[in-house]
Image (cartoon, grey):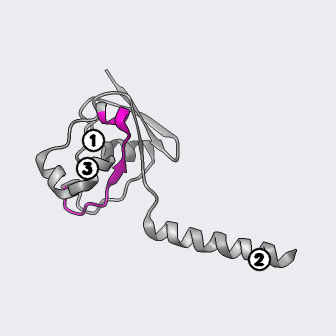
Amino acid sequence: MKHEITFKPSGKKTAVSPGTTVLAASRRAGAPIPARCGGKMGCLMCKIEVDDQAKEQLSPPSEAESRKLGSLIHTGIRLACQSKIEGTVTVTIPEDKLKAAIRKQLEAARQRDQEDLW
């Protein structure tokens, strides 16, 4: 039996076997999640956001994952390399902070340029 996983904000989907990590599923779906450690919980780059419904469809966090994430674990943050898919689920891949900062600066510059035209 396969479970479908959907990645926000891209909307990309794939079907995977139970027990597949979210990180592996993201690669299969073409919705890459950054990770440098090869899924060994060393880099903490593969954070994903999960809501209460998604929490029920993923494996519970291990003690090690809970320690690594600290209080973030209580805000719906999980590590994609440690989260195993147990049912149909939707997760959110957060925007990279550097890309978000650049995007905001570009949007502000465009808005200023438009205001100057009026």
As shown in the figure, which amino acid type bears the numbered disc 3?
Ile
Near-viewer residue (24 or 84): 84
Instruction: Identify which residue is drawn at 38% across, 28% down.
Output: 88
Percent across and percent down for residue 3 are 35, 27
Alpha carbon of mark 3 to alpha carbon of mark 1: how far? 17 Å
Q: Is residue 43 visible?
A: yes
Q: Which residues are magenta?
A: 41-55
Given contact means CB atoms under 8 Å apart, are the residues at marks 3 and 1 in contact? no
| Residue 105 picture quarter | bottom right
Given contact means CB atoms under 8 Å apart, are the residues at marks 2 and 3 in contact? no
Q: Quadrant of the C terminus?
A: bottom right
* N-term mark: 2 or 1: 1
Q: Which residue is mark 3?
A: 73
Instruction: Identify which residue is drawn at 63% across, 73% down.
Output: 106
Alpha carbon of mark 2 to alpha carbon of mark 3: how far? 41 Å
Q: Is residue 78 above or below residue 84?
A: below
| Residue 109 picture quarter | bottom right
Q: Which residue is mark 2?
A: 113
Q: Which residue is mark 1?
A: 21
As shown in the figure, which amino acid type bears the numbered disc 2?
Asp
Label 1 CA crowd tier, 10 Å (few <14, some 14–19, many 20+)? many
Residue closest to the far left: 63
Horizontally, residue 75 falls left or right of residue 12, namely left
User: Which one is in front in this view, the residue at disc 3 or the one at disc 1?
Assistant: 3
Disc marking residue 90: none
Q: Is residue 46 magenta?
A: yes
* N-term mark: 2 or 3: 3
Disc 1 secondary structure class: loop
Horizontally, residue 36 falls left or right of residue 91, namely left
Alpha carbon of mark 2 to alpha carbon of mark 1: how far? 45 Å
Percent across and percent down for residue 4 are 40, 30
